[in-house]
Amino acid sequence: MKRSVGFISLAAALLLSTAALANTVDIYEGATKIGSLTDGSVSVTFLGYTAPTVLDNVPAPYQAITADFNPSILLSKANDYFGTTFGADNRTSGNGGSMSFDIATNYFSLTFGQQRNAFFQNLSGDVLHLTYTTVRGEGAGLSHYDTFAAAAVPGPIVGAGLPGLVIALGGLIAWRRRRMAAG
């Protein structure tokens, strides 16, 4: 009986400690916390930007600082923050409050209200399963989120690869034979 109680206590402690280690980024508008974003993992898988090209790398609680600008220039601002040259983004509407969503790209941003934006980098190399929670009475809630991905790499040139190499080598051998026969 004592052994089973001890085992249950140990299992409960492990489960609770995992939840306590969840990766959470607090989102601020100035000095006011307006919400938090978590992926529920036990290690750091994403971080928020505190300034262009500056990720919050200090120990938890991690932070992301919002910036106020017109959504029409979101892509250029994202490139400033990320140090990238993305040509397009993919926008998904939020519900104006708390919500869960998935991020499969390395970079993403959240927009609160119409013009408050926070930028993030996915460090996991995998899909993030995120939950945004609004601080009641603070901020306007999640309006939408944007994901940023590199442009698609063009496909291979037709005839390239081993078959192309064999054909090119055959042409070179035929040319050399003709040249030797003529000379």
Image: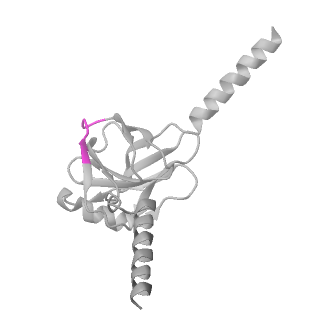
| Figure quadrant of the N terminus | top right
Give the image quarter of residue 142: top left
* Side of 31 relative to 72 (left or right): right
Return the residue found at the far right.
Answer: 2
Q: Residue at x 40, y 66 (%)?
A: 167
Give the image quarter of residue 163: bottom left
Vertical comparison of 39 with 153: above or below: above
Question: Which percent across, then down, holds residue 2?
Answer: 82, 12
* Side of 29 relative to 113 (left or right): right
Name the foreground residue: 74 vs 28.
74
Q: Residue at x 41, y 75 (%)?
A: 174
Question: Which percent across, then down, holds residue 134?
Answer: 35, 38
Name the foreground residue: 168 vs 67.
168
Question: Which percent across, then down, holds residue 105?
Answer: 39, 50
Q: Is residue 146 magenta?
A: no
Give the image quarter of residue 70: bottom left
